[in-house]
Amino acid sequence: MTSPTAAPLCAGRVVAVTGAGRGLGRAHALAFAAEGARVVVNDLGVGPDGSGPATGPAKRVVEEIRAAGGEAVAHHGDIATTEGAGSLVATALDVFGRFDTLVNNAGFLRDRMLVNLDEDDWDAVTRVHLKGHFLPLKHAAAHWRAEAKAGRTPEARVVNTSSGAGLLGSVGQGNYAAAKAGIVGLTLVAAAEMGRYGIQVNAIAPAARTRMTEDTFAATMAAPGEEGAFDAMAPENVSPLVVWLGSAASTGVTGRVFEAEAGRITVMEGWRPGPGVDKGARWTPAEAGAAATGLLAAAEPPHPVYGAR
Ligand SMILES: NC(=O)c1ccc[n+]([C@@H]2O[C@H](COP(=O)([O-])OP(=O)(O)OC[C@H]3O[C@@H](n4cnc5c(N)ncnc54)[C@H](O)[C@@H]3O)[C@@H](O)[C@H]2O)c1
């Protein structure tokens, strides 16, 4: 199951994709397999709000990969638990004998305005996205660090999944935006800590038509009318960048965030110092206000928050 026109980008690599039973994760898993990778297809098989686990989605994607001539195994663990994250890495090593790339992708939504957001909805969404990135990353990195210390420095890759909501904010998604912003911070720290062990860590902020976005983007995400037309919002359009970031070919790229949507790839340039002033002593509040007002007049205006009026 290799690309007909070029040498497979991921030949010999073993890749785990979390939440790969549907949507973007499924597209990533199939795309990695098409580039020669052996794939661990993780999915807890939950509903759009995280309820009711099932084994069907991961199994079906494994069958699709095998039917196309690729190699894959299903993993049904909850990646926001130590057991699920640890067994994900163990499955790659036990079944395929190596582990090269982790794609953190699993998650779900519970959207509410902040005043209506229950503590449970906050906990569930920050848990699945933020802890669900941290734990697989930690277990994968422990394996790769041991490899590096044994003199086998890997070409290891981690691709995390943030969101425009985490980069710019999104009305009605306070829990999700906080978790996705946290994933950017986690990505920067992991890239800085892990480079010495041969581990590169990047993040994407995707946009595609999946069950997660069919309500949000209904008007702009219609399926293509004509056969053969470019289906701009197909999840498969996001996967090529993820496959490249997850391959050995992306050497030297780490700690970066990319938006990926339709045919467009954008490097996101994050927080950096804008206009500043140093008094060299403590300000009074009134002085600080006057200084801040002057600096704001000279600063770039912020991008609007998604959904803000
Ligand atoms: N679709 C978009 O436009 C978009 C935009 C920005 C970010 N994202 C992010 O992309 C990722 C994939 O989203 P999608 O749109 O494909 O959603 P999706 O609902 O189609 O797929 C997510 C999958 O994750 C699985 N999952 C949920 N909790 C899990 C857990 N604890 N352990 C293992 N698997 C679990 C679900 O069963 C589901 O199959 C998410 O992190 C999402 O926040 C998507």
Image (cartoon, grey):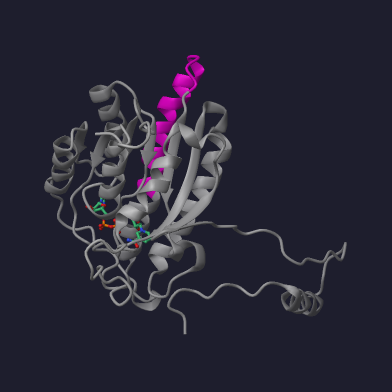
* Residue 39 vertical position relative to residue 239 in the rendered view, above or below: above
At a point 48% along the width and 58% down the height, the residue shown is 181
Tell which quarter ligand 1 is in: bottom left
Q: Residue 136, percent across and down?
A: 36, 39
Quarter residue 217 falls in:
bottom left
Query: Residue 149: within the magenta?
Result: yes
Query: In the rendered view of the protein, which quadrant contains the N terminus?
Result: top left
At a point 23% along the width and 71% down the height, the residue shown is 225
Quarter residue 95 falls in:
top left
Q: Residue 40, percent across and down?
A: 26, 35
Q: Nearer the viewer, residue 69 or 57?
A: 69
Residue 107 in view (yes/no)? no
The answer to whether residue 28 is left or right of residue 241 is left
Tally the numbered discs. 0
Instruction: Point out the stretch of residues depicted in magenta.
Output: 131-153
Q: Residue 221, percent across and down?
A: 30, 70
Query: Residue 122: within the magenta?
Result: no
